Amino acid sequence: MGGMRQGGAHRVRSTLQRDAIARLLQSSDRFRTAQEIHLQLRSAGETAGLTTVYRHLQIFVDEGVVHTVRLDDRQIAYRWCGQSAHHHHLVCRRCGVSHEFIDAESERRIAQAVEIQGFTELDHNLDVFGVCPKCQQ
Amino acid sequence: MGGMRQGGAHRVRSTLQRDAIARLLQSSDRFRTAQEIHLQLRSAGETAGLTTVYRHLQIFVDEGVVHTVRLDDRQIAYRWCGQSAHHHHLVCRRCGVSHEFIDAESERRIAQAVEIQGFTELDHNLDVFGVCPKCQQ
DNA sequence: GTTACTGCAAAAACTTTGCATTATT
DNA sequence: AATAATGCAAAGTTTTTGCAGTAAC
């Protein structure tokens, strides 16, 4: 089931695992896959099963504090973005490092280019990919 | 293996299956998943195994004549776009119908917003999602 | 005749679910 | 004490690969 959480609408508890996952994500501006996050936690001595990682990533995405990108056609990567407003990402294809950016004028123009078609409930994805300076060497 | 085709760099042959897949894609401006394409071919009396559908979609994507969008976090949908130049899509979340659009000024502004970071080999995805007039009823 | 394509069955990769146990409140 | 979270094992999805047979050139 898509955006639904486990069980129902109960209060989220603070646990070692949840906090470890949040802390890891908050500690860098890199996009990571669920599996990478799981491995990094393990090698840092934290315990968090892969299942738990997936569950919390989904919760964070639902809460809007974690954003995702499609790295290639197959993999989804996750990044902590806090409560910050609408924005987009410049992402390194090699290492996942990313920078947030926003251009209000472009937003406006795109909305305009599209409104003539009569679509409602509009939303958009804009991700820019490249190779970061570090990975160019 | 990411963008590589089966075998190596041999000449592509015209086959019943390849042509049927191409024809189906060309017959509408809708994004479809591989599985949908497979089912539609079957119910149209054409024979094309799911494996073959996946293989040709990959080839078409490599050739640049088919574009993809990520419908949600899990599913990829494919659409024939011919040889046409760089553009983006306004896609209906419900039925997959789509319109191409382009705004050169936005392209320029986004490129600018991003160039300061020193990334190379830039590329970007811009997909707008909504609900088309037909699906609103 | 040579070589690419097909499609089944099997494997691979990734994600979700069932459920008994454990931790949090 | 009540209930949410955990994590293993198992199942579910989606996509890819091996390979023997078939079709295109």
Image (cartoon, coloured by chain):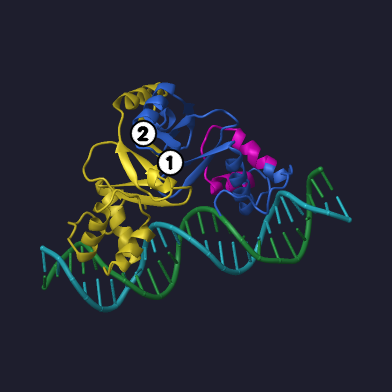
Chain colours: A blue, B yellow, C green, D cyan
Query: In terms of depth relative to the viewer, which is nearer, B136 or A86?
Result: B136
| A10 relative position to D18: left or right | right
A132 lies above or below B89? above
Residue A22 on the magenta segment: yes
Labels 2 & 1 near each other (Cβ < 8 A)? yes
A24 lies above or below B76? above
Q: Is residue A126 visible?
A: yes
Q: CA distance from mark 2 to mark 1?
A: 10 Å
- Residue type, mark 2 in image: Val
| A48 relative position to B98: left or right | right
A11 lies above or below A88? below
Q: Which residues are magenta?
A: A19-42
Examine the residues drawn in magenta and state their main secondary structure: helix
In terms of image quadrants, where is residue D15?
A: bottom left
Residue B85 on the magenta segment: no
Q: Residues within 10 Å of mark 1 (few under 14, many from 20)?
A: many
Q: Residue at horizontal 35%, vertical 64%?
A: B39
**Secondary structure under the numbered disc 1 in the rendered image:** strand
On the image, the x and y values in percent for residue A5 come to 63, 50
Q: Residue at horizontal 74%, vertical 42%?
A: A14
Q: Which chain hosts label 2?
A: A
Where residue B130 is drawn, which disc sits there?
1
Query: In terms of depth relative to the viewer, which is nearer, B83 or A91?
Result: B83
**Secondary structure under the numbered disc 2 in the rendered image:** helix
Q: Which residue is mark 2?
A: A114
- Residue type, mark 1 in image: Gly
Q: Which chain hosts label 1?
A: B
On the image, the x and y values in percent for residue B11 come to 17, 56
On the image, the x and y values in percent for residue B116 come to 40, 21
